[in-house]
Image (cartoon, rainbow, N blue to C red):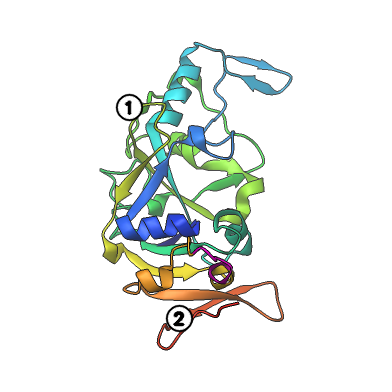
Amino acid sequence: MIVYKYMSLQGLNTCLNLRTIRFTKPANFNDPFDCAAAAAEVTMEGLNFHLAGSTNADKLFMIRNGIGILSLTRNPLNPLMWAHYGDNHRGGVIAIDTEEAGLECTEENIISASAGNVIYTTVRPSVDGDHLPYHHEITAQHDRLMLEKLFLYKSLHWSYEEEVRVARRVDFTPQVRHQDFEIPSSAIKAVYLGDKYFPALIDDYGSQLPRVHLKHQKYDIYLCYQDRRTWDLHAERFDSTGFTLPTV
C-alpha cells in the first residue's frame, strides 16, 4: 500500500537525508482531544473530567506518552493538507510503501498502516475505565474496538485529512516529544514538491532553503501545479535536464 506524508521543506530534506519517519506522542498533537477517549470517574453537565491522580487519568497519560503515532494520508494532492502541513505549498510530500517501510509488521506496530484508517465521528468515544489498559499491555492483538477508540477516533472536523495512522511503542520519557525510525530508501517511492516550491527558492536570497530537486535526484520527483479551471492540484514528473532556476 502507498501512503503519503506531508512535511515542511526542511523536514523533507531531513527525511530524505536520514531516511527517517517520525512517530509523535499524542500528548504533543495539535488536537488536544486526540487519543484521549473519555474514561472519567466523574461526569458533570456533559463534560468529562479526569480526576488528577486517578487510575484512569494515569493510564491515559501513560498511553499518550508511551505510544507514538505516525500520521499519513491517502491523498498527495489535497490543497488543505498542503496549506496546513506542507508549509503553505512550499514543502513536500513523500510516497511511502508501507510494506517496505515496516509499517505493516504487527510485531513492531500496535496498529499497522492497513489497519490504521482514522474513524471520523461527531461524538467523542468513551471507554469503560475497568477495561482501560496500561500502555505496556497494549499490543496489536489487543481488543480491536479498544484500539480504535484510543488511537483512531477523531472529530469529524478533521475528515479532510483522510488520515491513515500507524501506532508504535516509543520512549516513555515525558520530555521526549517524538521518536524517529529509519526506513529503507527503497520504501520512498516518490517525492512531491509544492506548487510554491520554486517561487520560494527564487525568493531565497541567502540560499538557506534546501534544493531538494538537486540534492535528491535518485528519487522520482513530481512537481505540483494548479488546475487552471478548477480548485484542484495536479502533479507531473519533474525533469531537471536543462533546468535552470530563474533569478530576479
For this view, does 108 lie left or right of residue 177? left
From this viewpoint, which residue is outermost toward the top? 53
Between marks 2 and 1, how big is the CA–CA gap? Answer: 46 Å
Q: Secondary structure at mark 1?
A: helix
Q: Position of residue 51 (x, y in %)?
A: 56, 13
Other residues around mark 2 within 10 Å, as few (<14) / some (14–19) / many (≥20): few
Query: Is residue 237 magenta-colored?
Result: no
Judging depth in this view, the residue of 17 and 49 nearest the camera is 17
| Image quarter hosting the C terminus | bottom right
Q: Which residues are magenta?
A: 200-206
Q: Measured from the top left, where is residue 246 in percent x and y?
A: 55, 80
Name the disc covering residue 237, or none.
Answer: 2
Choose top left, top right, bottom left or bottom right for residue 224.
bottom right
Residue 171 in view of the camera = yes
Nearer to us of marks 2 and 1 is 2
Quarter residue 37 falls in: top right
Name the one closer to the observer, 11 or 181: 11
Crowd band around label 1 with a 10 angstrom C-alpha radius: few (<14), some (14–19), many (20+): few
Check disc 2 and give the amino acid type: Arg
Q: Position of residue 44 (x, y in %)?
A: 70, 16
Q: Which mark is residue 212?
A: none
Residue named by callout 1: 137
Q: Position of residue 67 (x, y in %)?
A: 39, 34
